[in-house]
Image (cartoon, rainbow, N blue to C red):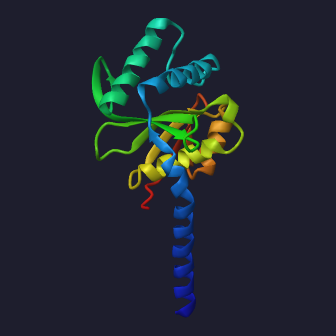
Amino acid sequence: MWAAFKRLWSNEHRKAEASDRLQPEVKRLEAAAIEDIDSFLEAARRADAQGHSPWVLRDEVRLATLRRALEFTVQRGQWLQREGSDIVRWQGRLLKLRHGEGPSLGMLLVCRPDEEAAWQLRFFYIRPEWQGSGHGERLLRAARYSLSGVPLHARLPLDCRAAVSSLERAGFTRMQINAFKVASFEASAEWV
């Protein structure tokens, strides 16, 4: 009995320590502003050039459409999602990771159809000058913490090795891979 109590106490102690380590990261995850959208679009363009973007951005009309959708998300907290021939409004958040009062290190877009659904991680990136320093993992862990109590889903090509590695280090589990080598990931709800 005493051994079971010690294991339980040490598990709770480790969870509390992990939560304490996350606290500073969470403070750096904040809502993006309209002026942050250009950086997000540039990252989406770079990803599209490599075939890794969830959007096809090869012409200015599509880029302008995505810009308007992101502005709507920043201003109203809603993501405009295509369902068949209709456009519906989902909950949406455009969030950024910053280093104290310094520049944005990266951003992510999450959306979901309603309060009962899991968040879907649509796109995330770390600015090129900050890549390779573990900031992708920090961004994703901070997102999981911020969306506490709700699972988070992501889909991306396995060719995005750095993004896949960041997801896995942040506690996402690879669920399945389709014929196009696009993997689905899920992070369970974290109650912190």
- Residue at x 52% of width, y 69% of height: 16
Residue 77 lies in quadrant: top left
Q: In this rendering, is residue 49 above or below 9?
A: above
Q: Nearer the viewer, residue 117 or 135?
A: 135
Residue 78 lies in quadrant: top left
- Residue at x 52% of width, y 14% of height: 57
Q: How many marks?
A: 0
Q: In this rendering, is residue 2 above or below 90?
A: below
Residue 182 lies in quadrant: top right
Horizontal arrangement in the rendering, residue 151 relative to residue 180 (left or right): left
Q: Position of residue 30 (x, y in %)?
A: 45, 41
- Residue at x 28% of width, y 28% of height: 89
Tell me, yes or no, if residue 116 can be seen here.
yes
- Residue at x 54% of width, y 75% of height: 13
* Residue projecting furthest to the bottom: 2
Q: Nearer the viewer, residue 109 or 53?
A: 109
Q: Nearer the viewer, residue 144 or 81?
A: 144
